[in-house]
Image: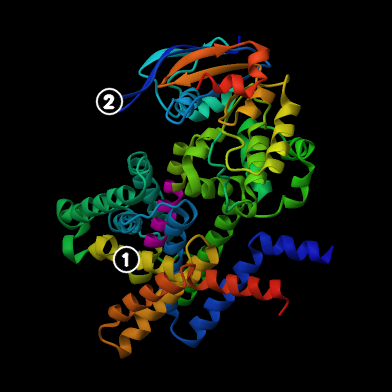
């Protein structure tokens, strides 16, 4: 077991955002968190990543408790978070964005660049461009590539295909697909056809809690069947 | 190969050092050595301030505290211990670093207006300490009049030698900051300015870096303060006066925040305006205000930023 979340509660002031969340993730597994807006999916990811402190419950990563740790410690332990809004460091070049992620992991910058180019060779011509000039899809790929630096164990990806065109979504799914089996991923996604293609298991979230866990491949592969749970 | 050497020389800051040195030597020869030395010292102060503001995105309303700490540390050493000017400068730098090191952990936790006002509050306390609380040692409102001893190898008590020494210090600070801001540390500073939370999640303890930058910035400002004490031969509460913070902020904005050239050009431009415009226009500060309004609305990148933008546009269109 790579990640175990037990009885997790999170509050925003007096409002309860998550309550009694229980889930687990195996090594190499891809789970998708599905639910309507406000269900608590992003809150859950942010809590695991260390941006929010839980009011109750535990998060075990690689058998070690990580609840309440600061984000940089969580990152160094091997959990990377790809934000929803696709914001890169726009004033830095693509290469500098990669360099910046490489230093804390002590990975060679050239290895980091090669890793990203292996995933997405088209990035090669953009290395010296300012990141603010990248398209939404290129930014997403840069963010995913940057998150892979230093060989993390778990990737938390928040709505990777949101606001992107069908062609770009295919490119991103192909990038994520190549990592499948080698890396554990927890993906928040609204697009159910994407969920059907990527997920090994699905958790349906409603009103801050886990409503249902779906293991059945037959159900996962039919986006209509998933929709019935929302 | 030749192009490689040229590019490396330019990127290392060597070209900048030569241009700055030449500019000040020409101006100093044509006008007044003493006044130009003052311009140089102020430019060092702007470089220190801009490391925090332009590069890390933290606007301080209280940087005069560090300038004053350096000035008073140097002045007190000369008055009560030794008149050696080099030791006075060293004491000034250490004084600024110490004050920055103590206040930094509190200040760098804040951002935006809160950061600016915390620094202003510290500056106000420092001003009170220099003016009233420690008046017996600092000379209160009158300050301390200082005499420095001549040093055998390099006698910086002589105005021309001190001009050269101050210029060397400016070039050295420029060069070191150029190396620092071009390094991975510099990239991280720009990242903190853009989005600190994301920098944390890449794995950086941004708090430590912010504190370190605060101490470097305060040390450079204190260095400028110590040099100013040597240039004037006295130190008084105007060296730590919070109302003078606007000078360094104006200078950084005029030159173009976040650029080393911009800081030097801004420092120089502000001093030219405040020294020469005042001869012809009694209320010159009003015109400075207008100039700042124009900059904010029309030329947000400052003088240097706009020069670079025009240059880039021209090279892109092949003009």
Where disc 1 sits, the SS reads: helix
Q: Residue B246 carries which label?
A: 1
Seen in the picture, residue B95 relative to A58 is either above or below; the reply is below
| Most common SS among magenta residues | helix
Residue closer to the observer: B146 or A135: A135
Whether residue B215 is in magenta: the answer is yes
Residue closer to the observer: B127 or B234: B127
| Direction from residue A141 to residue B41 in the image, left or right | left
Residue closer to the observer: B90 or B55: B55
Q: Position of residue A31 (x, y in %)?
A: 61, 19
The colour scheme used to paint the residues is: rainbow
| Direction from residue A169 to residue B231 in the image, left or right | left
In the rendered image, is residue A121 in sight? Answer: yes
Whether residue B290 is in magenta: the answer is no
Task: State the separation of the CA atoms marked 2 and 1.
Answer: 42 Å
Density class for disc 1 (Cα within 10 Å; few <14, some 14-19, many ≥20) is some
Tell me the residue at 35%/65% (across/down).
B229
Can you identify the residue that label 2 sits on?
Answer: A14
| Direction from residue B303 to residue A199 in the image, left or right | right
Tell me the residue at 36%/73% (across/down).
B293
Seen in the picture, residue B159 relative to A115 is either above or below; the reply is below
């Amino acid at each position: 077991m790579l990640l175990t979340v037990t009885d997790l509660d999170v509050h925003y002031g007096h409002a309860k955002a998550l309550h009694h969340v229980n889930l687990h993730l195996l090594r190499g597994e891809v789970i998708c968190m599905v639910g309507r807006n406000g269900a608590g999916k992003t809150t859950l990811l942010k809590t695991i990543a260390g941006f929010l402190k839980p009011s109750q419950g535990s998060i075990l990563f690689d058998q070690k408790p990580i609840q309440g740790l600061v984000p940089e410690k969580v990152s160094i332990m091997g959990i990377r978070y790809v934000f929803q809004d696709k914001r890169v460091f726009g004033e830095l070049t693509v290469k500098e964005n990669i360099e910046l992620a490489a230093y804390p992991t002590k990975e060679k910058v050239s290895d980091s660049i090669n890793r990203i180019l292996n995933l997405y060779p088209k990035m090669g011509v953009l290395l010296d461009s300012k990141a603010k000039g990248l398209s939404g899809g290129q930014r997403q790929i840069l963010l995913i590539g940057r998150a892979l630096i230093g060989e993390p164990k778990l990737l938390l990806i928040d709505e990777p295909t949101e606001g992107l065109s069908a062609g770009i979504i295919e490119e991103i799914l192909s990038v994520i697909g190549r990592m499948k089996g080698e890396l554990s991923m927890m993906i928040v996604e609204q697009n159910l056809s994407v969920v059907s293609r990527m997920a090994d298991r699905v958790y349906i979230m409603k009103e801050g809690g886990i409503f249902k866990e779906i293991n059945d491949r037959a159900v996962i592969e039919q986006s209509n069947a998933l929709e019935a749970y929302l | 190969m030749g192009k490689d050497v040229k590019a490396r020389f330019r990127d290392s800051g060597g070209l900048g050092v030569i241009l700055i040195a030449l500019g000040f030597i020409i101006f100093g020869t044509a006008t007044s050595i003493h006044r130009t030395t003052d311009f140089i010292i102020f430019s060092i102060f702007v470089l220190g301030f801009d490391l925090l503001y332009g590069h890390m995105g933290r606007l301080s309303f209280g940087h005069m505290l560090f300038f004053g700490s350096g000035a008073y540390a140097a002045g007190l050493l000369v008055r009560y211990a030794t008149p050696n000017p080099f030791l006075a400068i060293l004491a000034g730098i250490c004084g600024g670093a110490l004050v920055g090191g103590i206040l930094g952990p509190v200040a760098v936790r804040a951002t935006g207006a809160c950061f600016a006002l915390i620094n202003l509050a510290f500056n106000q306390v420092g001003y009170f300490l220099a003016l009233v609380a420690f008046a017996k040692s600092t000379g209160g409102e009158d300050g301390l009049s200082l005499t420095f001893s001549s040093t055998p190898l390099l006698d910086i008590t002589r105005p021309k030698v001190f001009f050269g020494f101050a210029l060397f210090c400016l070039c050295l600070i420029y060069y070191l900051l150029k190396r620092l801001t071009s390094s991975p540390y510099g990239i991280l500073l720009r990242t903190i300015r853009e989005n600190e939370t994301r920098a944390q999640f890449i794995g950086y303890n941004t708090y430590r870096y912010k504190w370190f930058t605060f101490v470097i910035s305060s040390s450079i400002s204190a260095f400028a303060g110590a040099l100013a004490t040597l240039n004037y031969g006295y130190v008084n509460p105007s060296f730590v006066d919070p109302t003078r913070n606007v000078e360094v902020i104006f200078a950084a904005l005029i030159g173009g925040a976040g650029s080393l050239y911009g800081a030097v050009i801004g420092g120089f431009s502000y001093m030219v305006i405040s020294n020469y415009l005042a001869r012809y226009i009694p209320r010159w500060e009003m015109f400075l205000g207008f100039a700042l309004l124009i900059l904010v609305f029309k030329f947000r990148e400052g003088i240097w930023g706009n020069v670079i933008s025009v240059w880039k546009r021209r090279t892109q269109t092949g003009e």
